[in-house]
Amino acid sequence: MREVLAMGLDEAYLVVDEALLAGDQWLTAKALAAVVKKVGADLVLTAEASIDNYTGEVPARVAAELGWPAVTYVRELKVEGGKVIAKRDLEDAVEVVEVQPPAVVSVTREINTPRIPTLLAIRAAMKKPVNKLGLADLGIGGGAKAEVLEYRPVSIQRKKVVVKEGTPEEKADKLIQYLRQEGVI
């Protein structure tokens, strides 16, 4: 928390509650949305993923809790003329999106290079407020909605196609033909 305060934030909010330890993405999003309402922000920036079992659900769930639009996988962001303009990564393209605040924006690592705080900024961060809140302070009760019953690894069955006959060029042509038949390319 002190590191991001040293990078330029004015104050920080930390939600500390035992119920969050066994919580799920729903509870995390509910808590974050409650902090946003309490603070009164109109633009929420998040990472694209977090340690919420690596589901990537929290930013979209925060947006849903707030009733705001969500823009995900943003690699470039600017605010102009009262609009948020974002370039976002899709699987095979980059899309430009405009949205009116309030909004939740999840960003990728390409968004920027974090600045390294100066020694003066690090010392000043020690005086900046870190507001600690519990779920009760945010008007949230209860625990997780989801229950994990078991974890299983993904099982993948290979087709085990081997092209043995022909020159390297013929083998490559046969492989490409097979991949097209399977709809891979």
Image: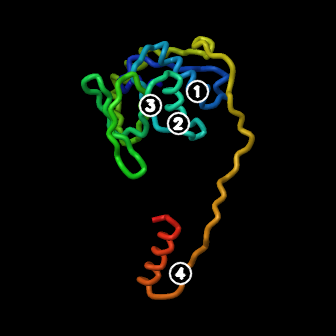
Q: Specify which label sits upstream in the sequence, 1 or 3.
A: 1
The three-letter code of the residue at mark 4 reads: Val
Q: Quadrant of residue 58?
A: top right
Along the viewing direction, whichever of 179 and 8 lies nearer the viewer: 179
Task: Tell me if residue 167 comes above or below residue 90 in the rendering.
Answer: below
Of badges 4 and 1, the one in the foreground is 4
Q: Specify which label sits upstream in the sequence, 4 or 3.
A: 3
The three-letter code of the residue at mark 1 reads: Thr
- Residue 112: which numbered mark, if any? none
- Residue 70: which numbered mark, if any? 3
Q: Quadrant of residue 106?
A: top left
Of badges 4 and 2, the one in the foreground is 4
**Residue placed at 35% from the left, 23% from the top?**
121
Residue 36 appears at what percent x and percent y? Answer: 47, 18
Q: Specify which label sits upstream in the sequence, 2 or 1.
A: 1
**Residue placed at 70% from the left, 50% from the top?**
152
Q: Which residue is identified by label 4? A: 163
Scheme of image coloration: rainbow
The three-letter code of the residue at mark 2 reads: Ser
Q: CA distance from mark 4 to mark 3?
A: 47 Å
- Residue 50: which numbered mark, if any? 2
Q: CA distance from mark 4 to mark 2?
A: 42 Å
Task: Tell me if residue 37 comes above or below residue 76 in the rendering.
Answer: above
